[in-house]
Amino acid sequence: MKQTWKKIFSIVLMGVLFAALTACGGKKDESTGLEVSEDIQSQLIQSAQSAVEAIVVMDDETIQSYLESEDAFSVSAMEAWQGSRDELGAYVSMGDAALETDKDMITVTIPTKFEKEEAVFTITFDKKYAATSMGIDVQYSMGTKLQRAGMNTLMGVGIVFCMLIFLSFLIYLFKFIPAIESKFKKSEAAPQKTAPAAETATAAAPALVQEEELVDDGELVAAIAAAIAASENTSTDSFVVRSIRKSNKRNWQRA
């Protein structure tokens, strides 16, 4: 319950402060342009300081509620704070504010110290003393600047080193290109070399068939000669067995 009342009180307080920022001040002297009296300057500075003190202690829910509002200054202030608070850390103290006038606007700058870094809040007002925008300029310390510079240098060196490794790897792969080309050439020449061997095997096949046929014919002649000798009661010593070849005319030739 206390937490709910605290949130309601902070929202009401911010509403009052923003109303004060947009409505504070007295009448403007038209003859002198934006020449602001000391009382109005004091009121503008106090309103800006109160707004900053309220903003730096807001929780996420309150910030979101102002981001969803229709007030341009509230949205601008919440966006600026939301983008810088992680780098700044917890609020510590506030320095002396300064006010500057221009032809079209009044600017209040407030130096502020936080746990991690320092920052300068800049709040602008228009000719009618209504707050229009707020910006936060983080003042990084020398240690933070050196750390960032070191990180940027390290990242740059790392990127260059990775590129060199990649290029070295590509150059290393170049030596495999001739071997790959030779393999493709050998694979293309292999069918041409095997073709003559196939032709030799095809040519040798009829010779083997002829030899087999000759062997078969000799056995046939020997069998016939033995049969004739047996029928005539004669000896087969005087018979001369010659090879018989088949004629293309399919006629028998005398031996």
Image: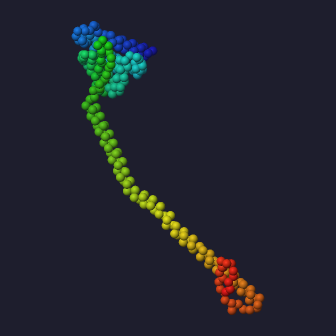
Work out whether 204 lies above or below 126. below
Is residue 196 in view from this perspective? Answer: yes
Q: Is residue 185 above or below residue 250?
A: above
Q: Quadrant of residue 198?
A: bottom right
Residue 47: quarter of image = top left
Question: Which quarter of the image is occupied by the N terminus?
Answer: top left
Horizontal and vertical percent for residue 180? 43, 57
**Which residue appears farthest toward the front when viewing the image?**
249
Point out the residue furthest to the top here: 27
Q: Specify the color scheme.
A: rainbow
From what the image shows, is residue 4 above or below residue 240?
Answer: above
User: Percent from the top left, x then y, of residue 81?
Assistant: 35, 23
Q: In front: 49, or 107? A: 107
The quadrant the C terminus occupies is: bottom right
Q: Residue at x 26, y 29 (%)?
A: 141
Q: Is residue 54 left or right of residue 207?
A: left
Q: Position of residue 221 (x, y in %)?
A: 69, 84
Camera-side residue: 187 or 249? 249
Which residue is drawn at the image coordinates 39% and 15% (left, top)? 11
Q: Is residue 39 visible?
A: no
- Residue 31: image location, x then y, percent: 23, 9
Residue shown at the point (51%, 69%) measured from the top left = 196
Name the residue: 27% across, 21% down. Answer: 111
Count every numbered label the image shows and give the total.
0
**In front: 9, or 172?**
172
